[in-house]
Image (tube, helix red, strand yellow):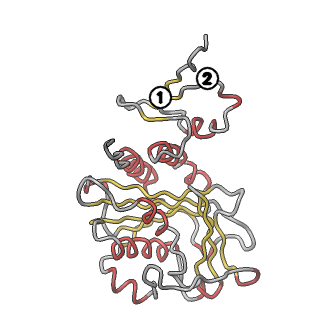
């Protein structure tokens, strides 16, 4: 019987997020969720599987982020290194939801950092599903494809005070309530700032490789990304490698190539 596959570790990517936040300096607005049950009660955060998915369409839309072709990242990065995650912290960059241009779609990056007990994190599929808060936050609707987030916030929710920090706080509360193995949760949200969202491109590309979603690249034992191919111009994964331009990628010729 073969040994079980090692659980992915995103220590390096979590460290990269810390450096990005540091480089953004005063552009980062920080809030905290210290009592998750109180936050859930005040913002009517539904338990997992217990809410009704809102439908936010037409004139009901107050803010929209991540609708294609706008840039969008949605990442859940797990680590056993507690020092890489500041529990309860919510960090927001860019425009507030009520300041986004009406009728447009802004770039967005959402990153959830989770520190877990033990060597293995909770089930990966459950962790990734939670990041979309499906049906859990009144007036907040999401659509998703792997690695992307498309969110809509209703006009009524904006009028009631929903902000980026509300969504980030809901993420912190949801992960702390849903997963006993998670001992620290931190949320990062970037809205309407293409340059700041773009800083997360390499992190998203690396996370795709570490989680096994990149069909060609793999991470070697020496920390170098390896690819068996040299036909970059014809490769549909080229965008990922381009995002890793600052990281060494070792290319290997296919068997039988010159």
Residue sitting nearer the eye, 184 or 91: 184
Residue at the outermost top position? 258
Image coordinates for residue 140, horizontal then vertical, percent: 58, 79
Which of the 4 quarters of the picture holds residue 120? bottom left
Q: Residues within 10 Å of mark 2 (few under 14, many from 20)?
A: some
Q: Residue at x 59, y 14 (%)?
A: 256
Q: Residue at x 47, y 62 (%)?
A: 128
Q: Select label 2 or label 1 by which is in front.
A: 2
Cα distance between the residues tagged 2 and 1: 15 Å
Q: Name the residue carrying label 1.
A: 248
Q: Secondary structure at mark 1?
A: loop
Q: Secondary structure at mark 2?
A: loop
- The quarter of the image holding the C terminus is top right
Q: Which mark is residue 230?
A: 2
Q: Relative to 38, say whether 69 is above or below.
A: above
Question: Decide: marks 2, 1 in contact (CB < 8 A)?
Answer: no
Residue sitting nearer the eye, 174 or 99: 174
Image coordinates for residue 112, horizontal then vertical, percent: 43, 61
Residue sitting nearer the eye, 236 or 91: 236
Q: Residue at x 40, y 84 (%)?
A: 40
Q: Relative to 191, say whether 218 is above or below.
A: above
Image coordinates for residue 247, horizontal then vertical, percent: 47, 32
Q: Residue at x 69, y 79 (%)?
A: 61
Q: How many numbered callouts?
A: 2
- The quarter of the image holding the N terminus is top left
């Amino acid at each position: 019987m073969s040994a079980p596959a090692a659980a992915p570790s995103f220590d390096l990517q979590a460290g990269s997020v810390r450096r990005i936040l540091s480089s953004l300096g005063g552009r980062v607005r920080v809030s905290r969720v210290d009592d998750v049950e109180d936050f859930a009660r005040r913002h009517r955060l539904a338990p997992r599987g217990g809410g009704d998915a809102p439908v936010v369409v037409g004139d009901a839309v107050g803010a929209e982020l991540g609708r294609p072709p706008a840039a969008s990242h949605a990442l859940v990065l797990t680590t056993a290194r507690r020092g890489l995650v500041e529990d309860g912290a919510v960090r927001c960059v860019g425009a507030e939801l009520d300041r986004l241009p009406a009728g447009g779609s802004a770039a967005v990056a959402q990153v959830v950092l989770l520190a877990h007990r033990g060597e293995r994190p909770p089930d990966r599929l459950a962790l990734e599903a939670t990041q979309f808060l499906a049906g859990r936050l009144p007036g907040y609707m999401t659509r998703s494809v792997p690695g992307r987030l498309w969110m809509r916030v209703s006009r009524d929710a904006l009028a009631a005070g929903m902000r980026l920090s509300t969504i980030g706080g809901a993420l912190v509360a949801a992960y702390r309530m849903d997963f006993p193995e998670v001992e620290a949760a931190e949320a990062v949200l970037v809205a309407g700032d293409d340059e700041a969202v773009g800083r997360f491109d390499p992190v998203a590309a690396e996370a795709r490789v570490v989680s096994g979603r990149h069909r060609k690249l793999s991470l070697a034992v020496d920390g170098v990304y390896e690819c068996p191919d040299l036909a970059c111009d014809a490769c549909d994964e080229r965008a990922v490698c381009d995002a890793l331009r600052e990281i060494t990628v070792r290319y290997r010729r296919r068997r039988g190539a010159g």
